[in-house]
Amino acid sequence: MSRFPPLAALVRVSLVRKFLLMLTALPLHVGCTETFEVLSREDAGVGMEWTTCEQALRMGSQGDRCQGFQDCAVTTASGCCAKLAACVEGMLKLQEKCREECPASCVVDGQCLSGREWCVDGRCTSCLPPPTGCLDDCPRGWLPRMRNGCYTCECVPPSTCYEDSACTTGLSCYAGASCAEGCPPGVPRCCEGNFCSMPGCATTSPTGCMMTGCPSGHTCVIKDCAPTSCRCDGVAGIWRCTSDCDGGVCVPVR
């Protein structure tokens, strides 16, 4: 038996090392948005198996099948960020990096590529592949939360409105508590659990979370005492709530 490893094994090790060298050659940190054209999978014409590095960079997801192409990279117009791709043992390896001195690329999810990224710590970060191990059902009429066209493992209550124009004449749209990262306080267009009521009250309603939802990283439980519904008394400028205690309160997810 030969004392040397098979040629195929040496080739695989060489590819892995080459990809790692590509990553370490740039003094960058993870998280950036590429500026090249994004193709649909139909336009790419290769389904989930990529045969050219350029197409894999534009539309591929981590772990997709690939074959027969060399490593490649692309940088943004500013030169701050780079996206690298390699086909290692038939599996697509992707890495996005930005230089430390680069400014934040996003504040809200809407500044990132819809259906592919969301904003995390000021950087557009891939939301693919979709999360697994989520709850099968959302509680009491809640809906799966979408962030910039990406699936999450969170559930949110339905919204009556996203702006005042969706409410009956004379009413205002109040923001719920399930808001996207970077959403300004009290702005319903980037929140869920929104509802209509008379104008003139503080933007934060004391209504329980079963109606208004919870911030990310929290879940709604029926405990303590929170009202199920509140309405704004615009004349007095105060919230008037039901006397029950079944509205739910937000607690951190363990």
Image: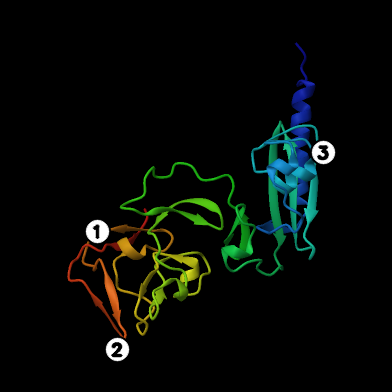
Task: Give the numbered dot on residue 19.
Answer: none
Q: Quadrant of residue 202?
A: bottom left
* Callout 2–callout 1 Cβ contact below 8 Å: no
- Count neighbours of disc 3 (C-alpha within 10 A) and say few if under 14, some if 14 to 19, many if 20 or more: some
- Report which residue position mark 3 lands on: 70
Residue 167 lies, with reference to residue 80, above or below; the image says: below
Q: CA distance from mark 2 to mark 3?
A: 69 Å
- Count neighbours of disc 2 (C-alpha within 10 A) and say few if under 14, some if 14 to 19, many if 20 or more: few
Task: Give the numbered dot on residue 222.
Answer: 1
Image location of residue 194, percent across then percent down = 40, 68
Residue in view at x 33 percent, y 74 percent? 205
Callout in the foreground (2, 3): 2
Image location of residue 239, percent across then percent down = 28, 79
Callout in the foreground (2, 1): 2
Residue in view at x 46 percent, y 66 percent? 191
**Is 117 or 125 nearer to us in this picture?**
117
Q: Quadrant of residue 169?
A: bottom left
* Callout 2–callout 3 Cβ contact below 8 Å: no
- Report which residue position mark 2 lands on: 235
The amino acid on which the numbered mark 1 sits, given as a three-letter code, is Ile
Mark 3: secondary structure: loop
The answer to which of marks 2 and 1 sits earlier in the sequence is: 1
Mark 2: secondary structure: loop
Q: Quadrant of residue 113?
A: bottom right
Callout in the foreground (3, 1): 1
The amino acid on which the numbered mark 3 sits, given as a three-letter code, is Gln
Residue in view at x 78 percent, y 47 percent? 22
